[in-house]
Image (tube, rainbow, N blue to C red):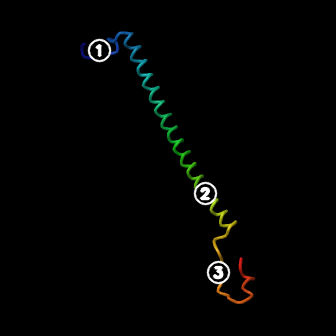
Amino acid sequence: MQEGQCLSCLIPRRLKRRLKKIKMQIKEQEGLIITQKQTYEWRRAAEHDKMTAAFDVEAASHELEKVVHGDGPAKFPIERADAKAYRI
């Protein structure tokens, strides 16, 4: 090969086609990698949302228990006969 000659002119057509095919496969695989990364991120976000929702449900359940059953027995310092009126 002499200086100034085009290397692609020296490569046979068959090799050019093979090279083009390989480059297309590389681009296809790069596209698949991007798709897989996005899918991973979406699934991770969905799992986080699921865990957050489970926590919210449990917190709401505890709040409901407080409303239904109260926070515990109410204690009043009144020791008179009319103290029954103040008890819950």
Location of residue 59 by image quarter: bottom right
Q: Judge left or right: residue 61 versus residue 24.
A: right
Q: Judge left or right: residue 52 versus residue 29.
A: right
Q: Amino acid at mark 2?
A: Glu
Q: CA distance from mark 2 to mark 1?
A: 74 Å
| Residue plotted at (29% across, 14% down) | 5
Provide residue 52's location: percent of width, then percent of height. Answer: 57, 53
Location of residue 63 by image quarter: bottom right
Q: Nearer the viewer, mark 2 or mark 3?
A: 3
| Residue plotted at (64% across, 59% down) | 61
Q: Judge left or right: residue 8 versus residue 44.
A: left
| Nearest to N terminus: mark 2 or mark 3 | 2
Q: Amino acid at mark 1?
A: Gln
Q: CA distance from mark 3 to mark 1?
A: 100 Å
Question: For the residue labelled by badge 2, is the local secondary structure a helix, a strand or a loop?
Answer: helix
* Residue at the extreme front: 81
Badge number at residue 5:
1
Mark 1 Cα shell of 10 Å, populated few (<14), some (14-19), many (≥20)? few
For mark 3, what is the residue?
Answer: 75
Mark 3 Cα shell of 10 Å, populated few (<14), some (14-19), many (≥20)? few
Provide residue 19's location: percent of width, then percent of height. Answer: 39, 17
| Nearest to N terminus: mark 3 or mark 1 | 1
Residue 47 position (above or below residue 61):
above
Q: Quadrant of the N terminus?
A: top left
* Residue at the extreme bottom: 80
Q: Amino acid at mark 3?
A: Lys
Q: Nearer the viewer, mark 3 or mark 1?
A: 3
Question: For the residue labelled by badge 3, is the local secondary structure a helix, a strand or a loop?
Answer: loop
Badge number at residue 58:
2
